[in-house]
Structure formats: structure tokens, C-alpha cells
Image (cartoon, helix red, strand yellow):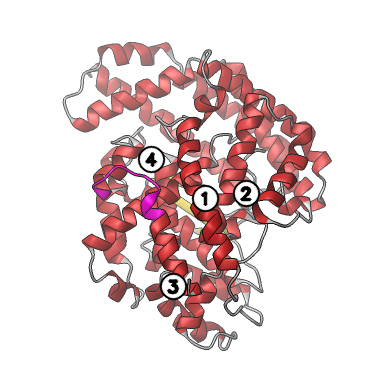
Amino acid sequence: MTAFEDLMAYQRETFALNQIAGRLGWDQETVMPRGAAPQRAEEMAAIEAVLHARRSDPRVAEWLHEARAESEAGKAQLREIQRAYDRAVKVPADLATTIARVTSSAQGTWAQARADENVGAFLPVLEEVVSLKREEGAALAQGGDIYDALVEDYEPYTTGSQIATIFDQMRPRLVALRSAVLDRPEPQSLSGGFDELDQMRLSQKLAIAFGYDLNRGRIDKAVHPFSSGSGSDVRITTRTSKSDPFNCFYSTIHEVGHAAYEQGIDPAFALSPLGRGVSMGVHESQSRIYENQLGRSRAFTGWLYGQMVEVFGDFGIEDADAFYATVNRVHNGYIRTEADEVQYNLHIMLRFDLERALMEGDLQVSDLEAAWNERFLADFGYAVDKPSNGCLQDVHWSVGLFGYFPTYSLGNVYAGCLYEALRNAVPDLDLQLAQGDTSGATDWLRLHVQRHGGLYAPREVITRASGFEPGPEPLMNYLELKFGEIYGL
């Protein structure tokens, strides 16, 4: 075997082990007994120790030195293996293992603190997580910016300053649109109760409508919806609320966007660096375009309205036009995952600034709740009423995902670019969506984005697909046009 073949065989085993670690995480979020948390922390630490040893194995450096590749995919494999190896060798093995153990345990502490509305119970373990992630960031940055080094895990070749520039361009238009919309009368709200089993049945129908392959996936319930896995085993979760079926339906569509990306990657890339989404920003572009530009469009909501009437009967909305406005209702709220399209990015900007300050040492963990509440009041105009609606609402910091939050808004920016190109490429898109047929859109996304996996750098993927360099202008134009029409602005 050649050095390249040896390297790829080794990578295949490493990625298979990584999938096992992911399955342990899925189990922890869905069906694991609560009392198993301490043991699971040890299990996660043990497998992370094995993975870190493999990622930083000196043989990888030797193979990389000797390996040659002629194909575009082969060269991309070597590029990504080199990038991952360079990062792995900078982080001490005991630090990587400790982070895995502490974050696994911290997840359970966060969940209990959130249920108890007790920030104080969570802050000591968060202090430990922040300290460990700052240590990791410093090891990776080697004198550079700690936060930039952590962002690299989720959005390669992107810095905190670049993200801040994009956010600064978006914020004034978002604030102006939010203010204008909230001055207008609200659309109708849903009324009555919605059986949770019926919600799950309809959510499965929606998942299939958006191309989710249930032969290679499954749908379960979790407190915080997520997608897990790649290739032939890609699982999603959703959640239900008796009074709000949209939470279930749009969480499902959102996670199907993530899952469809993983299921749509070229099978030749399976269990390799190219066999997964290239970045969380590109990943989020798929979930957000599925959920919003497609799932919340006037055409698709017209079809969904008929489905809901068939399942639930009368739920207080008189027709499909009123339903479209209800689905896209802009309203005050605390929860990021339930936020409307107009306000969602403001939630992300809040988290981005706070976590960047935590990593740079400008904000102490002990001051986080006060800083969150002060910023939320300034941005949204009303006070946080309880911790589960404030700094305890998201799981990300408990599991050490610092640098992850801004990729949600980058995903929205990318989705805006892709949607502009998609509408030009599929002129009868609305006619298809009105029949509940998303294939014109999802096939285009699979061809131009999903199948490539990690073949190209994140911004290159979007540039190739959309035909222009990504920026916030298409997203902001889409939001202003859509909500200007709904609210008569």
C-alpha cells in the first residue's frame, strides 16, 4: 500500500470511532438514564483519549510527508488531514481528555440547573469549562487570538473580527426592521390543543417531504433538538408542545436540513475528512434554508395549512393567507430556537459578544447572568424573567462549544445567498412547494452544496453554488421584502 492508502485507512478507523462517540452523545440526549451521567462522563473521556492519541499519532505526520495525491478529492483529503493534525498536536492529551470528561458531566449539571432555575448551581462547573477552553484556545493560538482559534473548529478560515464586521453590517437593518414590524398589529395566533402523537406523525411526514431518508435515520424527542451522525446513520430529534405545534414541525424541518446535508454527501467520502459537512456555517445554511426560505414560504405554508386542518381540525386560523402570517409572526420572546427570522440573529449577536468576552477575559463567569440580562434588555426592550429564558437556555457553553454560536448567523447569511441563486435556477419553485414538493429545491442544494462535503473551503462552497462571494445583502433584502409584505410596511 502507498502512504496515501495507509493514511486513508487509518483515517477511516479514526472517523468510525468518532461516530461511536457521537452515538454516545445522541444516547445521552435521548434515552440515557439520568443516573448514568457520571459513568457516561468517564466513557466519553476514555474514547476522547483514544481519539486524541490517534489524531496526534506521529505516524500521521510521516504519512502526510510521504503521501501524494493526484485527484482534487485526494488533495483535499491531505489538506484537511494536515489541518486537523496541526491542531491536534497543539493540545495536550490530558487536556483533551479532561475537557471531554468535564463537559459531559457539565451537560447534566446544566440540565438540572435549568430545570431548577438555579444559575448558581451551574456557574462553578461553567467556570471550569471556560478555564479549560481558554487553555485549549491558548494552546491552539500559540500567541494569537484565543477566540479565533476556537472558531476555527466550527468555521475554518474565519476570524472573530470578520464575523463582527458582518454582524455590524446586519445589526442596523435588523433593528430597524424589528422596530417597524413590532409597531404593526400581530397576526392571529393558534388556538386549542394539539395532540403530541399527531404532531410526531405529521413531523415524520414533513421530514420525508424534505427528503430525509428514514432507512438511514430516525426521529426521536429531546429537550434541545439536534442532528447527529453522518453517512448511513444520521439521526435527528425534535420536541413537542401541546399548545405550539410549530415548535415541533419547524424544529423537525430544521434538523432535516442538517441531516439531509450529511446524507447527501458523496458516499465515496464516507468516514473521511471530506465525508461530513465542511463547517457549521454551511451546515446551518442548509437547516435554515429548509426551515425558513422553503418551509416558511407562502407556497409551502399553504400546503402545510391543509395538512394541519386534516390532522387537527379547526385551530383558529381562517385561511392559508392568515396561516402564512401566523407562521411568520414576529413576536417578543426569550428563546433563541423559537425566535422569528427578524429577531433570530440578534439572539446570536448577544451570545457572540458574551462568549468572545469570556474567552478574552473581559467578562467573568460570575458576572455572566447580569451581563446577559443587561444586554437582553438593551437589545429587546424587556427584562429576562427567569434563568431558563436567559443564560441557562442553551446547552452549548456547558459542553464547551465556544465559537459555535456565530455560525448560526453565518448560516443565515449563506442561506440568503443560496436562496437567491436557487430562485433563479428553479423558476417554478413556488408551484412545486405549493404541492408539498420540495424536490426541486432539495435536489439543487444536494447537487451544488451537499454532495461536496468537505471538498471545498466553506466560503468557496457558497461562492460556487451561488455564483458570488457570500455577504449579508441577499439575506437582508429577503427579510425586508418578506416581512414588509406580511406587515404592510
**Residue that mark 2 sits on:** 29
Query: How packed is label 4: few (under 14 Cα within 10 Å), some, or many (20 or more)?
Result: many
Q: Do the residues labelled 1 and 3 touch (CB within 8 Å)?
A: no
- Secondary structure found at label 1: helix
Amino acid type, residue under disc 4 in the picture = Arg
Image position of 49 with respect to 295: above or below: above
Q: Which of marks 4 and 1 is in front?
A: 1
Query: How packed is label 2: few (under 14 Cα within 10 Å), some, or many (20 or more)?
Result: many
Estimate the x, y position of residue 51 in percent, counting from the top left: 50, 25
Amino acid type, residue under disc 2 in the picture = Glu
Q: Which of marks 4 and 2 is in front?
A: 4
Q: Which of marks 4 and 2 is nearer the N terminus?
A: 2
Please provide the residue range marked out in magenta: 466-475
Q: Are marks 4 and 2 in contact (CB under 8 Å)?
A: no
Quadrant of the image occupied by residue 445: bottom left
CA gap between label 4 and label 2 equals 21 Å
**Residue that mark 3 sits on:** 485
Image position of 474 with respect to 182: above or below: above
- Secondary structure found at label 3: helix
**Residue that mark 1 sits on:** 172
CA gap between label 1 and label 2 equals 37 Å
**Residue that mark 4 sits on:** 276
Please tell me which residue is depicted at 69% across the width and 56% down the height of the picture.
Answer: 381
